[in-house]
Image (cartoon, rainbow, N blue to C red):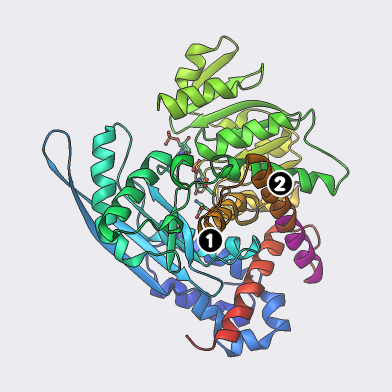
């Protein structure tokens, strides 16, 4: 790799050889290693202790069969994963994704990103991720419950509040976490609240966890804009997706005075020039579990566009909150031509490497997911803290803690970027700050 520092190129080659066919994982590793040249030049001790090779190799990877019976009495088989990537800073921590596209390469890219994201929060959590190729769409509650119970019947032996603590991600929300926690509790005969996060408020969940990722992304955006003497107030915003992250990113952007004019799902997008009605969006997506077109059916000011790209809708702030590689170079150029000033990744790796280059070359403020969406996992760590002390905090207190954490994430990125010669580059700053913290802990812990 010509643009990789020679101290790192060989390690990237090893990653390619050792993990064939895992494209998304390769992409995530290259993006991080591409920014670490100045770090390994300054700290040869990381190279000498093989920190790069070790950080790219998961500590443990689990793949298992999940058999369950559907409502028609037919046996179904899914494959599930848990990649316990790095525990230098704390127990493995990261979500579970249920989506038909899930395979080892996706779980590993997400787990790898999670290591640095979790470090950036300043909380004591290691990195992990899991999921299954199970598709919850169109499944009844009873089917989802049987699937979750079967999955947990295998996974429980690998979990624990000091070992590995899953949460939600695409396709895994409050309903799924409830079923997973119920089965964990039954099998282990332990009310171990801190073993899963994203729990319901009725049984040990934290206020603000549902809203946390989206709120955090918007606060990060506001911090970036502040460095240029600007703010979100009065701005035109587009979010992609219409799931957990997208809904609450839109809600907080509106609260800060922005106008959110479009969102999407995998079938198309809606444009609502009157500004999104968040309560209607929540009804359609969270309660009815319907397609985004149902929003336009209910609201006169909204139009549904089947297929197409939500990034064709002109905006000043773009918040990709759906999935990986959903915004490519051509779409980035369209956004720049339409006058975008800031882009923050609510999703994990939604912008392709070419899109990131276009934004950075165009002088657009750009926040990578591992920084901008760290509010979700940070609030998971606050949930663990409340569970450990058998306490539950108010919404206002938890929200204030999260806001402070996001300012901290922003400042850590900005400081590291400055220190290593790329001022204003949040991609470099996030990678470097997260990496240095984990690398220092790994050095201290010896060759383990
Ligand atoms: P949800 O399942 O709640 O929503 C996902 C949204 O993205 C849906 O609108 C979905 O549309 C859309 N989407 C998913 N896959 C695709 C695809 N292949 N093509 C087009 N659209 C797609 O998930 P979340 O909101 O929780 O997660 C969204 C992103 O945020 C993910 O990248 C996740 O990793 C990341 N994230 C989530 C956190 C959390 O706490 N939940 C924390 C940090 C990051 P459709 O319904 O049509 O599939
Ligand atoms: O990508 C992520 O950070 C998440 N899906 C949240 C993980 C968590 O443990 O809360």
Q: Is residue 239 visible?
A: yes
Give the structural element (helix, strand or loop) at label 1. Answer: helix
Question: Residue 158 sits in which quadrant?
Answer: bottom left
Mark nearest the camera among 2 and 1 is 2
Q: Residue at x 54, y 32 (%)?
A: 309
Instruction: Give how far across and how far down residue 23 sits, in percent.
Output: 44, 60
Q: Main secondary structure of the magenta part?
A: helix
Instruction: Give how far across and how far down residue 16 sits, in percent.
Output: 44, 71
Measure the C-alpha gap from mark 2 to mark 1.
23 Å
Q: Is mark 2 within 8 Å of ligand 2?
A: no
Instruction: Give how far across and how far down residue 215 sits, in percent.
Output: 64, 41
Q: Which mark is residue 400?
A: 2
Compare residues 116 and 178 and report the one nearer the observer: 178
Q: Residue at x 26, y 49 (%)?
A: 149
Left or right of 188? Residue 37 is: right
Q: Is residue 369 visible?
A: no
Q: Is mark 1 within 8 Å of ligand 2?
A: yes
Instruction: Report the residue marked by disc 1.
Output: 114
Left or right of 123? Residue 38 is: right
**How many C-alpha atoms fall within 10 Å of the one at disc 1: few (<14), some, or many (≥20)?**
many
Mark closest to the chain's N terminus, 2 or 1:
1
Segment tinted magenta in the rendering: 409-419
């Amino acid at each position: 790799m010509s643009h990789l520092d020679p101290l790192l190129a060989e390690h990237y080659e090893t990653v390619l050889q050792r993990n064939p066919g895992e494209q998304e994982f390769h992409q995530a590793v290259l993006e991080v290693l591409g920014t670490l040249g100045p770090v390994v030049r300054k700290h040869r001790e990381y190279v000498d202790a093989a920190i790069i090779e070790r950080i790219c190799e998961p500590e443990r990877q689990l793949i298992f069969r999940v058999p369950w019976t559907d409502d028609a009495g037919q046996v179904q088989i899914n494959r599930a994963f848990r990649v316990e990537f790095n525990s230098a800073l704390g127990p493995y921590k990261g979500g579970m994704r249920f989506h038909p596209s899930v395979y080892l390469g996706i779980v590993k890219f997400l787990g790898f990103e999670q290591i640095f994201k979790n470090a950036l929060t300043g909380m004591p959590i290691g990195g992990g991720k899991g999921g299954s190729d199970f598709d919850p769409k169109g499944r009844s509650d009873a089917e989802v419950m049987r699937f979750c119970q079967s999955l947990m019947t295998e996974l429980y032996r690998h979990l624990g509040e000091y070992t590995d603590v899953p949460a939600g991600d695409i396709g895994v929300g409050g309903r799924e976490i409830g079923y997973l926690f119920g089965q964990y509790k039954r099998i282990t005969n332990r009310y171990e609240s801190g073993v899963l996060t994203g729990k319901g408020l009725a049984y040990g969940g934290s206020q603000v966890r549902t809203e946390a990722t989206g709120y955090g992304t918007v606060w990060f955006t506001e911090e970036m804009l502040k460095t240029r003497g600007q703010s979100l107030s009065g701005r035109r915003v587009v979010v992609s997706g219409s799931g957990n992250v997208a809904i609450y990113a839109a809600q907080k952007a509106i609260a800060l005075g922005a106008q959110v004019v479009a969102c999407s799902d995998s079938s198309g997008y809606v444009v609502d020039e009157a500004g999104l009605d968040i309560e209607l969006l929540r009804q359609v997506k969270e309660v009815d579990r319907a397609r985004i077109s149902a929003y336009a059916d209910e609201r006169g000011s909204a139009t549904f566009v089947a297929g197409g790209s939500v990034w064709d809708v002109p905006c000043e702030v773009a918040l990709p909150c759906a999935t990986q590689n959903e915004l490519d170079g051509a779409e980035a150029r369209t956004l720049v031509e339409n006058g975008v000033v800031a882009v923050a990744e609510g999703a994990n790796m939604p912008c392709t490497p070419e899109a990131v280059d276009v934004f950075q070359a165009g002088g657009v403020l750009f926040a990578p997911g591992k920084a901008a969406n760290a509010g979700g996992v940070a609030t998971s760590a606050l949930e663990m803290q409340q569970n450990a002390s058998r306490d539950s905090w108010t919404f206002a207190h938890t929200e204030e803690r999260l806001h402070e954490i996001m300012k901290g994430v922003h400042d850590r990125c900005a400081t590291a970027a400055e220190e290593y010669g790329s001022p204003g580059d949040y991609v470099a700053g996030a990678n470097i700050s997260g990496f240095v913290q984990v690398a220092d802990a790994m050095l201290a812990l010896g060759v383990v």
